[in-house]
Amino acid sequence: MNKSLDPRVNRLNIPTGELTPKVPLDQFGTFEVFVQIKEGKGYRHEGIVHAPNRDMAFLFAKEQFSRRLMCAGIFVVETRNVFVTAFTEDKDNIYNHISDTYPEDGEEEQYEIFHLEKRGKQHDHIGSVPAKNHQQALALAKPNFIDGDPIFNVWVVKTSDILFTNEEDMIMWNTLPEKKFRDASDYRAADKIKEFKERQA
Amino acid sequence: MYGGGNTFESIKATGLENEDPVKLAEFEARIERGEKIEPHDWMPQLYRKQLIRMIEQHAHSEIIGALPEGTWITRAPGFKRKLALMAKVQDEVGHAQLLYGAAETLGKPREQMLDDLVSGKSKYSNIFNYPAFTWADSCFISWLVDAGAIVNQLANARGSYGPYCRALERICAEESFHLKYGHHCVIHLATGTEKQREMMQAAINRWWPPMMHFFGPSDKASVHSEILMRWKVKMSSNDEQRNQFLDMYVPKIWELGFTIPDPKLGKNEETGKWEYTEPDWEEFKRVINGDGPCNAERLAVRRTAEERGRWVRQALLAPKTQYVAPLA
Amino acid sequence: MSEIAIKELLYKIADDQLILGHRNSEWTGFGPLLEEDIAFSSMAQDKVGQSQAMYQLLHELGEAEPDTVAFMRNSDQFHNCQLAELPNGEYDFSLIRHFLFDFAYAIRFEMLSNSSYVPLAKLSKKIQGELRYHTMHANTWIKQLGSATEESISRLQNSLNEAMPYALGIFEPSPYEAELKSEGIFDGEEALKEKWLAKITEVINQTQLQLPDITTLEPKMGGRAGQHTEHLQPLLDEMAEVFRIDPTADW
């Protein structure tokens, strides 16, 4: 290959000749990422990362989803541990379709409830409920939401399946103020243009 | 960043005759009402296929798009530029991550998309097959290529597929930093020393033809593109986007005292449309098909990165997690 | 307060952060997986930003502007440890270096957050937040790869063996150790090294890696006094290539 204009590429030692095709790999798991913009606000679903485990999912989520936003906390949960209801439309509240009966198996522990309140938007964390299983958590949440604004979809997650930010790690979001180099507001230059035009005139 | 629908291959048949007419009508009514389509909703095969292709190409364009500007990442002049360029190139990688995630909700795993990228099966925006010779080239890209991408992405953000729109909302917010940063750099070169002005003018001369290619050739009227418009997959024509870009940015280039290497370029005040020399579409095709100045290098870098990272990925692969498509 | 001692301290910290931040930024776009590419880039940005803030403190003490100091000196005027300037190598080396270096710096900034030199103490407190993420990142990766496959373990072990003598160079004593200590500015390189060794030993012991016996190693010193490997000058030339086209120009 010819010399690259990028000195980094020249240091990559790209093999000459035919490149071997990429080896197909299995994928890492998928983790759903929730972000809390500031203390006191609820957690909202922001996206996904691929990671081999929760700890790494957390590491990856932090920089992908909070390097610019104000952020007070993040949590991640593996996608397959999220239990999802069906979706409803218009004024139809999904809780109308949730059975009041539920299986009794399992030990009681805490579950987290997430609601989709508007189509096209993200799921928001609503609260938690102690229950024996996901189905019971849903049934226990029902009386609180059945008469309110329609909820179109619910996610239920066992709290122990979630990796939260530790209290002591919260300082991670307390960074140097110089981070504004990432924001558009740091690049005003209208004065320079004006001055330039005046010089030309 | 991403260029218009320029890498679409036309699909001969729409396959709509095989779709359930009741479901199809509900689907179209939902889009007509301005609602988003979500991963769990019924959708025609053509919609799914076209969106996967579009979002995937967009994602590839981001990750390959990190390379031309990355050429200058170790050489940015001064702290402010050094930090900003690092953050900007990082954003491009971040955009790829977001977009692959959106495409995955339609059923194609990220690994498969990355395989198709390095094997040359999938395309990416043509403009990234051109080299960034000087610092000023990287400034051109940050400002004007990103400006073009924003025209395209703002349009697509009004499209019908929920996960893609949400990814684009995030992306557009970050692009506003790119645009301001790029403009800031160009303004400094424009108002700086003679040498700086010359660097910038030379970069504009080099990048103008690929910039005109960026939005793709005029769309041919077809049943296919009519359907994609109706389904809000394609939100505006390539020519409309090109015109919008010229309208917004040519005056900004001119106000800095630079020239644009096209004697025919000018706005027709009667039609409100810009007129220009027809871009060389033969070259465009040649570059798309692999014969551009940097196609080989871009893919070789991607393959090498994958290859050098392989041991890391293999070590991390653990049976503790299992791949499933993202939820939203 | 001994200004010359403070300046020496600030210069080595700033130069360390700048040079390693620069090196780490070379990975952007080439990382082993997308998410890690992003994370590693953020940490490189943190380091370069930290160095800028340190040069700013120096500027307030009468040194030249941060841009001039960073982009116009030659290698013999740089005070970074040699560890920072070594080429990136493969990801195993970059990760090991990141692990050894960032634990040292997390502890250094923790110590400095109690410094009697108030501007430095304030800045160090801020930087601690960033370093918390860096050490969490390093910790997680080293534990993962240090106990995963035969290849990952042997790669990390080789890199650890290679990097360790250079890592000991982080703690090259300053000519002003006594003043720094007696004036409560900084508790000294030796104290830092002890804490660092305890910390990295704790992490390494949770993996299948072996910490080299540091009593048998010859630390790579000299960086603090401007003696560098052949890798630093080309790095600086590359970094300043555009800036030096016209150092008086506004870029």
Image (cartoon, rainbow, N blue to C red):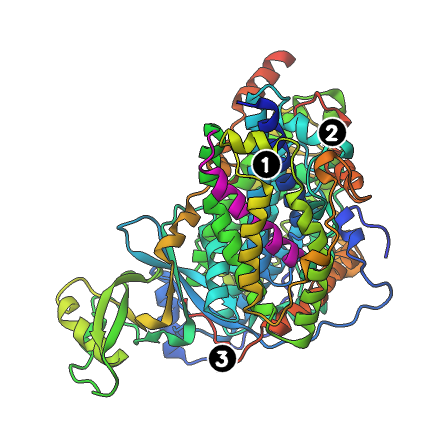
- The prevailing secondary structure element of the residues shown in magenta is helix
Which residue does the numbered mark 2 point to in the structure image? Answer: C73
Query: How far is mark 2 from mark 3, CA to CA?
Result: 71 Å
Range shown magenta: C94-116
Query: How far is mark 1 from mark 2, CA to CA?
Result: 15 Å
Query: Could you tell me which residue is drawn at 28 percent across and 68 percent down?
Result: A112
Quadrant the C terminus of chain C occupies:
top right
Q: Is residue B286 above or below residue A17?
A: above
Q: Are marks 2 and 3 in contact (CB under 8 Å)?
A: no
Q: Of B29 and A110, which appears nearest the observer?
A: A110
Q: Of A25 and B134, which appears nearest the observer?
A: A25
Q: Position of residue C228 (x, y in %)?
A: 78, 40
Q: Are marks 1 and 2 in contact (CB under 8 Å)?
A: no
Q: Is residue C18 left or right of residue A168?
A: right
Q: Are marks 3 and 1 in contact (CB under 8 Å)?
A: no
Instruction: Name the chain under label 2.
Output: C
Task: Give the structural element (helix, strand or loop) at label 3.
Answer: helix
Q: Is residue B92 above or below residue A102?
A: above
Q: Which mark is residue C51?
A: 1
Q: Position of residue B136 (x, y in %)?
A: 71, 35
Looking at the picture, which amino acid does disc 2 mark? Arg
Q: Same chain, marks 3 and 1? A: no
